[in-house]
Image (spheres, grey):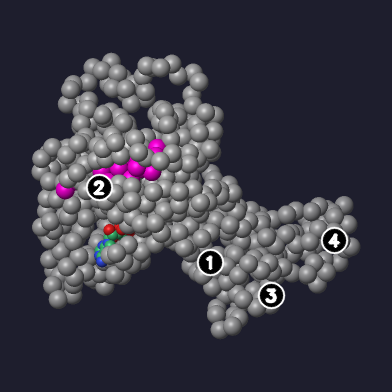
């Protein structure tokens, strides 16, 4: 009798030194290694399998090596997924192993010929002979995604351009003058924007039929809970704001996830702004969704928000297809509102509604009053590359950050994964099913002043209820490590955004021995808040002025998780001086505890040479 076992393995160009980290991350044993050279590029990798027998490992390694050598194009950057079939006889001896793999980059499946690869002495089973080597297990995440919803441009072109341009150019001063930005006449004149059928259908399906008009929303419920628990007024402050902000970020993350999948299929969707920074439909869409939800939840006062995007770049006839996509994405996203206990808008938002919502982000900030601070898609570069990014929302009251919500849709629960590209993580996740709960879908951090520290919860998704997400929420704590030699530091990926030679020198001075963890976006603050790294450093070059939306939410979350964030002079970041972090001394540093922070400041004092920046 023969037993056919199908082993799924992961083959990738990974450093063998990473074996233990990777096998911990996978909770799998490393069973083989691939080495080979082709076209001048070294091809090497690991084979991870579920088996515990070294027997398979040898065979797999041999087969994989042959495959690597026989391929015209060896994988250079992306890890490659493959499969191994092994044939065992009844006594447990391996008769043959076959290995196939595919480089998603080049799209061609590579596989060994079953006839040639058979090593065993016994005859092959009919089943084994008939089925070809399963050389393509999973495709690149983006290609496999089923989302489409790319609207036709005809309807968008039907919009009178003048009206849209006017709406797009509404300045904050105008919007402050009437509190809503666009006059009711303009609103009425809004042409019947082709209402997305899908949005209204989705809405009627999703609308909670059990919810009576006038019943409490979850946000109200929290306030009531707080009342019942007899909390003082001070303790209750910002409870409702935090709830609404958290729901808004959860929902907006769904929008960003969808657009990220679209972008990975079609990179043309990312555009350059005038300042040469990237912008996508997600930036506008997330800003509109969050702005809309906040202004609906707190209608008593006009929404004040300092946010990265303005609709200026959406002006003009040629931008109408983009604008149309933004409006569709916003309505599609808001149709999911019941997922977070919020009502669906009675009518889908019109183009003007969306432009107005985006333009509410033009507040100047400052010391007085309350304003929200939003980076709709922080780490746009990571976003378009299918990697880390964050949706970051904070509330500033009288110049002080009082709550923060940081959505990190691609942040893995296990820090080992941060050493690898996120697309690898997604592909491998499909390969080795997640071990723990809902955390593989992304993480949302939240905290408020006077609350009980920072919390992390899994990101909601279409099939995951708010209740199940909340049931898994955990307090987020910074790492307990105090020995710099044991510490990990993180920093921006791009050299242009931070002086990496300066940070390398500082790390060396501190005795940090591990390589820096480079990650896009405020996900780095998230990593600190959940104990994945002990230090964060960013030293912008030249006269670059840091923006408050790039740090407000992340900085607050880290502090609430027990960490310290200052500038390089040891002063707290000042979010009360407008849209920029004015008066910043050199750069931004964050540590998991005051002890490490003092050591870092001392190292900075010792090694800082102003000519290096
Ligand atoms: N020259 C320069 N120096 C320093 N910082 C800059 C610079 N240019 C842009 N930015 C801001 O940095 C934000 C991205 O920071 P990251 O930590 O994600 O950087 S990196 O992409 O990982 O290198 C990025 O945020 P997003 O625009 O939201 O991506 C910018 O606000
Ligand atoms: Mg940013």
Give the CA distance from mark 3 to mark 4: 21 Å
Q: Nearer the viewer, mark 2 or mark 1?
A: 2
Q: Nearer the viewer, mark 1 or mark 3?
A: 1
**Residues packed near mark 3 inside 10 Å, few (<14), some (14 to 19) or many (20 plus):** some
Give the CA distance from mark 1 to mark 4: 31 Å
Q: Nearer the viewer, mark 2 or mark 3?
A: 2
Q: Quadrant of residue 302?
A: top left
Q: Which mark is first along the chain, 4 or 1?
A: 1
Quadrant in which the C terminus is drawn = bottom left
Q: Is the Cβ of the residue at disc 4 closer than 8 Å to that at disc 2?
A: no
Left or right, 427 with respect to 613, comes to: right
As drawn, which residue projects farthest toward the bottom? 40
Q: Which mark is first along the chain, 1 or 2?
A: 1
Give the residue pinned by disc 3. Answer: 66
Residue stretch rendered in magenta on the structure: 349-364
Give the CA distance from mark 2 to mark 3: 63 Å
Give the residue pinned by disc 4. Answer: 129
Residue 354 in magenta? yes
Residue sitting at x 13%, y 42%: 399
Residue 172 at x, y = what percent? Answer: 20, 46
């Amino acid at each position: 009798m023969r037993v056919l076992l199908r082993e799924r393995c992961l083959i990738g160009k990974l450093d063998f030194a990473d074996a233990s980290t990777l096998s911990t991350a996978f909770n799998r044993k490393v069973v083989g290694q691939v080495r080979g050279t082709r076209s001048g590029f070294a091809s090497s990798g690991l084979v991870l399998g579920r088996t515990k027998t070294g027997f398979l490992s040898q065979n797999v390694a041999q087969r994989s090596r042959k495959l690597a050598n026989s391929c015209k194009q060896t994988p250079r950057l992306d890890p490659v997924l493959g499969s191994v079939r092994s044939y065992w006889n009844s006594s447990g001896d391996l008769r043959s192993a076959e290995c196939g793999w595919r480089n998603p980059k080049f799209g061609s499946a590579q596989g060994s010929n079953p006839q040639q690869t058979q090593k065993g002495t016994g005859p092959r089973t009919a089943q084994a002979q008939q089925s070809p080597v399963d050389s393509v297990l999973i495709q690149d995440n983006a290609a496999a995604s089923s989302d489409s919803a790319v609207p036709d441009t005809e309807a968008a072109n039907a919009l009178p351009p003048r009206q849209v341009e006017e709406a797009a150019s509404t300045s904050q001063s105008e919007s402050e003058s009437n509190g809503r930005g666009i006059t009711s006449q303009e609103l009425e004149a809004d042409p019947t924007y082709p209402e997305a059928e899908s949005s209204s259908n989705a809405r009627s399906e999703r609308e909670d039929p059990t919810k009576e008009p006038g019943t409490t929303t979850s946000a109200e419920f929290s306030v009531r809970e707080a009342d019942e628990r007899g909390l003082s007024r001070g303790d209750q402050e910002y409870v409702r704001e935090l709830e609404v902000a958290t729901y808004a970020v959860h929902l907006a993350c769904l929008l960003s996830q969808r657009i990220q999948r679209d972008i990975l299929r079609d990179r043309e969707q990312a555009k350059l702004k005038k300042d040469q920074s990237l912008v996508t439909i997600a930036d506008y869409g997330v800003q509109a969704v969050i702005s809309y939800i906040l202004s609906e939840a707190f209608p008593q006062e006009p929404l004040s928000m300092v946010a990265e995007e303005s609709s200026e770049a959406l002006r003009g006839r040629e931008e109408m297809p983009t604008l149309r996509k933004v409006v569709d994405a916003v309505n599609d996203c808001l149709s999911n509102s019941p997922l977070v206990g919020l009502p669906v808008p009675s009518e889908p938002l019109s183009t003007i509604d969306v432009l107005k919502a985006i333009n509410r982000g033009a507040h100047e900030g400052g010391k007085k009053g309350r304003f929200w601070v939003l980076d709709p898609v922080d780490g746009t570069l990571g976003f378009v590359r299918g990697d880390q990014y964050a949706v970051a929302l904070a509330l500033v009251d009288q110049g002080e950050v009082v709550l923060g919500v940081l959505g990190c849709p691609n942040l893995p629960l296990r820090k080992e994964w941060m050493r690898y590209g996120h697309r690898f993580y997604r592909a491998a996740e499909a390969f080795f099913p997640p071990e723990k709960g809902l955390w593989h879908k992304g993480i949302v951090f939240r905290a408020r002043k006077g609350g009980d520290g920072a919390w992390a919860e899994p990101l909601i998704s279409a099939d995951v209820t708010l209740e199940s997400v909340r049931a898994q929420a955990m307090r987020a704590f910074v790492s307990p490590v105090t020995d710099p030699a044991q510490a990990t530091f993180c920093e921006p990926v791009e050299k242009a955004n931070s002086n990496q030679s300066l940070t390398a020198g500082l790390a060396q001075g501190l005795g940090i021995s591990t390589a820096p963890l480079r990650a896009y976006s405020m996900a780095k603050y998230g990593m600190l808040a959940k104990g994945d790294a002990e230090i964060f450093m960013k030293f912008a070059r030249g006269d670059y002025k840091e923006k408050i939306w790039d740090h407000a939410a992340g900085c607050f979350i880290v502090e609430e998780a027990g960490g310290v964030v200052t500038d390089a002079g040891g002063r707290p970041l000042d979010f009360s001086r407008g849209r920029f972090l004015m008066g910043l001394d050199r750069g931004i540093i964050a540590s998991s505890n005051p002890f490490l922070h003092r050591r870092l400041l001392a190292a900075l004092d010792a090694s800082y040479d102003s000519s290096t920046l």
